[in-house]
Image (tube, grey):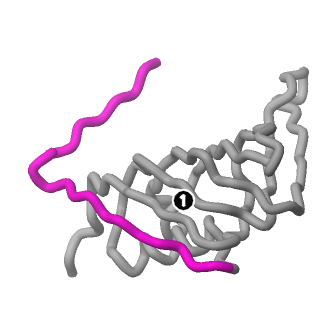
Amino acid sequence: MTQSQQWDATKSRILYHRFQPGESLLDALEELARSEGIREAIITSCIGSFTQLKLRNLCRRDEDGPVFERQTIDSNLELVSAEGYVQPLPERGPRVHIHTVAAHPSGEVVGGHCEGATIYTGAFMYLHVIEDEPQS
């Protein structure tokens, strides 16, 4: 079954945000979504640097379901790209889902599902906000 949804483009907006050194990318984006009243958004661009990156990548699927490999990189990395979204969760606030590509100083890249990332010098993100929380 295919699911799709349409939004009214006249009500969307573009938001720019700079994340500060030491911030958690996921936690700070969640807080930004709450403070800005964002219900759904798409990460259109994100670059910067990390001091730590936690990745989770799908390795295979077996009879019990998906099997993941987790990796924590404690090193200065250049955030080359990030994409993902903010969506509402029925039982709590926003759900942030990000996939990242980051480069070691050598230029070797790593990437995958971001389970956590600590900002090094800063990170710069553009969000296409497609739906805001209803005003009470």
In terms of image quadrants, where is residue 64? top right
Instruction: Determine whether the residue tagged by mark 1 lies in a helix, strand or loop.
Output: strand
- In percent of width and height, residue 108 lies at 80, 38
Neighbourhood count class around disc 1 (C-alpha, 10 Å): few under 14, some 14–19, many 20 upward: some
State the residue at coordinates (80%, 48%): 104
In terms of image quadrants, where is residue 120? bottom right
State the residue at coordinates (86%, 61%): 75
Residue 58 located left or right of residue 102: right
State the residue at coordinates (89%, 49%): 71
Q: Which amino acid, mark 1?
A: Arg
Q: Which residue is mark 1?
A: 95
Residue 18 magenta = yes
Furthest residue in direction left, as rendered:
10
- In percent of width and height, residue 110 lies at 78, 40
**Up-down relation of residue 71 to residue 75 (above or below):** above
* Residues drawn in magenta: 1-21
The C terminus, quarter of image: bottom left
Residue 106 located left or right of residue 95: right
